[in-house]
């Protein structure tokens, strides 16, 4: 079953939509959640919550890509669980480290002005990523979207950990320059 057929099931509020989505993208969503939480039970719960959110939001939403839509929902849910756990434990980890690295370039504050610029920012970020060589783009996304650790990235990309860290630093510097060139204050 393809995305359009599954989305049509969601739009018709057919309960088969959740089963079809789980079969098609369950492993993908679980990998995202488990990568952030490092807890299979909590990751499974996030995936189930993501299907519920899809059920509740489609309609009125009609996503172009169910994979991306569900992936974004499960990622946000997993990050919320992670933040709640961190608030209780006051612990660190890869998520906090990766987000801290990006905070050098992008502020996390939500202001009314920032909300207005969100779409322009997305376009600038997409432009930045499109201009990167494939390996750098994948490295950036694995670190800052999937929140992979530097050791895991070193293995995945067959690089030294120092090379990963240096490359990510250079990419953040390039991102800062790109955003400034696009008119964003960083």
Image: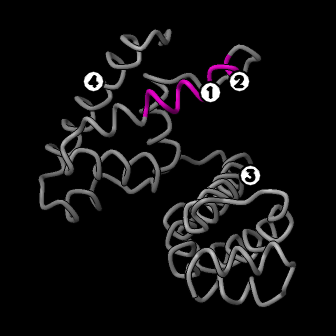
Using a 10 Å C-alpha cutoff, classify the residue at mark 2 as few (fewer than 14 neighbours), some (14 to 19) or many (20 or more).
few
Question: What is the CA distance from the residue labelled 2 to the residue labelled 3?
Answer: 24 Å
Horizontal side, residue 112 vs residue 146: left or right? right
Question: What is the CA distance from the residue labelled 4 to the residue labelled 1?
Answer: 20 Å
Question: What is the CA distance from the residue labelled 4 to the residue labelled 3?
Answer: 32 Å
> What's the residue at 62%, 74% (across, down)?
4
Using a 10 Å C-alpha cutoff, classify the residue at mark 1 as few (fewer than 14 neighbours), some (14 to 19) or many (20 or more).
few
Vertical arrangement, residue 101 with respect to residue 174, above or below = below
The magenta segment: 114-125
- Secondary structure mostly taken by the magenta-highlighted segment of the chain: helix
Using a 10 Å C-alpha cutoff, classify the residue at mark 3 as few (fewer than 14 neighbours), some (14 to 19) or many (20 or more).
few
**Residue marked by disc 1:** 118
- Label pair 3/1, CB-CB below 8 angstroms: no
Q: Nearer the viewer, residue 59 or 84?
A: 59
Q: Earlier in the sequence, mark 3 or mark 1?
A: 3
Q: Earlier in the sequence, mark 4 or mark 3?
A: 3
Q: Earlier in the sequence, mark 4 or mark 2?
A: 2
In this view, the mark in front (4 or 2)? 2
Examine the structure image and report whether residue 146 is included in the region drawn in magenta: no
Residue 84: give its label: 3
> What's the residue at 74%, 83% (across, down)?
18
- Label pair 1/2, CB-CB below 8 angstroms: yes
**Residue marked by disc 4:** 174
Q: Indicate the colouring scheme.
A: one colour
Vertical arrangement, residue 156 with respect to residue 140, above or below = below
Q: Quadrant of the N terminus?
A: bottom right
Q: Nearer the viewer, residue 58 or 174?
A: 58
């Amino acid at each position: 079953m393809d995305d359009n057929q599954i989305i049509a099931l969601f739009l018709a509020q057919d309960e088969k939509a959740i089963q079809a989505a789980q079969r098609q993208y369950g492993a993908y969503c679980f990998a995202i959640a488990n990568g952030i939480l490092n807890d299979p039970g909590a990751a499974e719960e996030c995936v189930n919550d993501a299907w519920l959110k899809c059920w509740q939001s489609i309609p009125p939403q009609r996503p172009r890509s169910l994979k991306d839509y569900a992936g974004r929902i499960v990622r946000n849910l997993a990050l919320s669980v992670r933040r709640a756990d961190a608030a209780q434990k006051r612990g660190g980890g890869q998520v906090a480290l990766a987000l801290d690295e990006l905070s050098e370039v992008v502020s996390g504050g939500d202001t009314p002005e920032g909300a207005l610029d969100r779409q322009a920012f997305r376009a600038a970020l997409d432009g930045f990523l499109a201009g990167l060589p494939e390996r750098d783009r994948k490295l950036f996304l694995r670190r800052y979207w999937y929140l992979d650790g530097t050791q895991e990235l070193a293995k995945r990309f067959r690089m030294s950990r120092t090379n990963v860290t240096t490359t990510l630093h250079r990419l953040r510097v390039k991102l800062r320059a790109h955003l400034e060139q696009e008119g964003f204050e960083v």
